[in-house]
Image: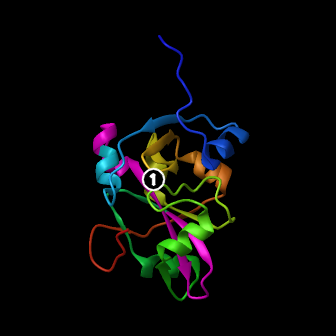
Amino acid sequence: MAKKEHISVTPATQFLRQHGVVFSEHPYPYEEHGGTAVSSRALGVEEHHVVKTLIMQDEMASPCIVLMHGDRKVSTKNLARQIGCKSISPCKPEVAQRHSGYLIGGTSPFGTRKAMPVYIEQSILQLPQIYINGGRRGYLIGVAPQVIVDVLQAKEVQCAIDEGNSIHV
């Protein structure tokens, strides 16, 4: 078997290596606005196992990271209530990029420019492995979901919905 090459060095992969986290690398052909439907199809995994990284902000414009299943939306009303805010909304793309240091479509919760609180949908932690952005477009990494709690001190929330009052990013 041939030796596996490093596919990408990003702030996210550097962060994970510094923390001794084992992860697999999964490049795929990026499609503008394709989202998790495209990446899950390219990797041959369920979209539910692909986790999107959303940069949101509260009513005071304080940013946070919300991790959600690729096939679910965030109930901002439920999220705000659970984290003790009046309201939560997605950041504009240029603001999200400024906070995270990543381009939209390539945002990872690891190695962000600014330290932000991280919230993870509780049911993600029930999965054996998740696929999450590795810090650039067209590049996911596979990790055990517990890694997010262990290295990012993510707080569990329950704000996933299929439809209704939600934000689909």
Residue 17 in picture, x, y percent from top left: 68, 38
> Is residue 44 shown above or below 15?
above
> Is residue 20 shown above or below 82?
above
Residue 121 in picture, x, y percent from top left: 47, 61
Identified by mark 1, the residue type is: Ile
Residue drawn where x is 34% and y is 51% of the image: 48
The number of discs equals 1
Q: Quick check: is 53 in the magenta stretch?
A: yes
Residue drawn where x is 57% and y is 76% of the image: 83
Identify the image quadrant of residue 68.
Answer: bottom left
Please give the residue where the numbered disc 1 appears in the rendered image: 124
Left or right of 50, for residue 37: left
Which of the two residues, 137 or 150, is positioned nearer the viewer here?
A: 137
- Highlighted magenta segment, given as a residue range: 41-66
Quadrant (top left/top right/bottom left/bottom right) for the C terminus: bottom left
Which colour scheme appears in the figure?
rainbow
Q: Residues within 10 Å of mark 1 (few under 14, many from 20)?
A: many
